[in-house]
Amino acid sequence: MHLRILSSLLLAVVLAGCTAEAETPAQSAPPPQPVDVATVIYAQYSPEHTFTTRLVSPQQVELRPRVSGVIDAVEFREGSHVKKGDLLFRIDPRPFAADVARLEADLNRAQAALRQARSEAKRAKRLQGRNAMSAEQAESRLSVAAQRASELASVKAALEAAKLNLEFTEVRAPIDGQVSNAFITAGNNVIAGQSVLTSLVATDRLYAYFDIDERTWNSSFSDVSMQSQTPAALSLVGRNDLAHMGQIDFIDNRINEQTGTLRVRAVFTADAANLRPGAFARITLEASASQPTVVVPDRAIGTDLKNRFVLVVNDSNVLEYRKVELGAREGALRVVMSGLEPGERIAVNGPARVGPGMPITPRDVQIETQDLTILASDIEPSA
């Protein structure tokens, strides 16, 4: 009897516990994760284009002697800056001086011979006028005088050439610029027009030639001309700063049919400590006209195996995957060429802790716009 009562009591306790558990309300789901959200920037933007090149000097000279001979002396400090007309090399002048002296003697002799021939020609004319000399003899003396005049002119020309050769034994700088080392030193024989003594480059300014493809030129630089003085920024290899400013001063007269590119040149004032001919450089040009562009924080962009993407917040506050095509980076911002429209909202901190299809609690923030000119969007941002 007691055992039956105890069993009934235990059964009642179990049933009561089950009923209480069944009547307990289900626990509520956690709220969506709060995420920083911002409306994309729609702004006027002038894209920048970068081209690689090597600097060249407007004037480059391989210095060669005009006469053959033995170098007497090297008259410059290697690597120094020289002025036009400065003496650089001296070639042994003695053979050329001797040639000048010989021709000067020949000149005196030719002048004396001409004076005598002219005197005899005059006498022949007088004698012929008194019928004291035949016409044939008079003409012979006139012919001799003409020959002596030609001989004198020939000696004068030879003497002038010899004096030039003597002058050419002093090899002088043909331009202002920086000289290299002496390739041939004193005591060595040089051959006129063949031996390279040294090289000079003009250093007051430098050129940067580069090629712009036809599509880029037509879309970004169609208004550029040589008279527009379009600025160009230059940075050297190993340096990220655009430390040197120049301008466009030459645009070729045709597009290369083989490559579909247009040759352009920028000119820079040379700095001997930094800019040198032959240096590898990057030239940056800003497009001549700005265009409306979507801009987002660079940290908002994610990368998967194939694409760059952002997470867009839809009207239901759910994140959506959106593939984007990117342009240049401007500080902490990134230009979006396609994939986003003005007025759309994105997760500004990227896909580090959230992903597509996730509901969120939007936490509105502002994107720092730097120096961009913000445009009024045609699409009203979502609430």
Image (tube, helix red, strand yellow):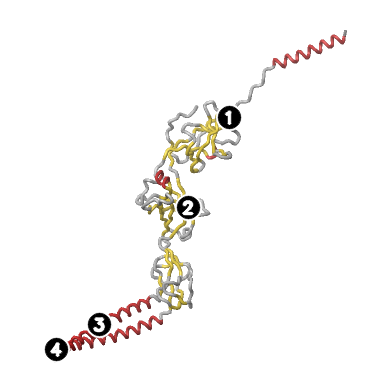
**What is the CA distance from the residue labelled 2 to the residue labelled 4?**
86 Å
Residue corresponding to mark 2: 52
Q: Residue at x 32, y 78 (%)?
A: 160
Residue 256, placed above or below residue 302:
below
Query: Is residue 140 shown above or below 63?
Result: below
Residue 161 spot, x, y in % from top left: 34, 77
Q: Say the numbered circle drawn on residue 357.
A: 1
First in sequence, mark 2 or 4: give its number. Answer: 2
Instruction: Tell me which amino acid carries mark 4.
Output: Gln
Measure the C-alpha gap from mark 2 to mark 1.
43 Å
Question: Do the residues under discs 3 and 4 have CB atoms within 8 angstroms?
Answer: no
Q: Which labelled disc corresponds to residue 149? A: 3
Please state which amino acid type lies under the numbered disc 2.
Thr
Quadrant (top left, top right, bottom left, bottom right) of the N terminus: top right
Along the line of sight, the residue nearer the viewer: 274 or 309: 309
Query: Which residue extends farthest top?
Result: 1
Secondary structure beneath disc 4? helix
Q: Nearer the viewer, residue 44 or 338?
A: 338
Query: Which label sits on residue 337?
Result: none
Residue drawn at x 37%, y 48% as measured from the top left: 224
The Cα–Cα distance between marks 3 and 2, rounded to whole angstroms, is 65 Å
| Sequence-earlier tag: 2 or 1 | 2
Task: Say which label, 3 or 4, has the lower sequence index.
Answer: 4
What residue sits right under mark 4 in the picture?
Answer: 128
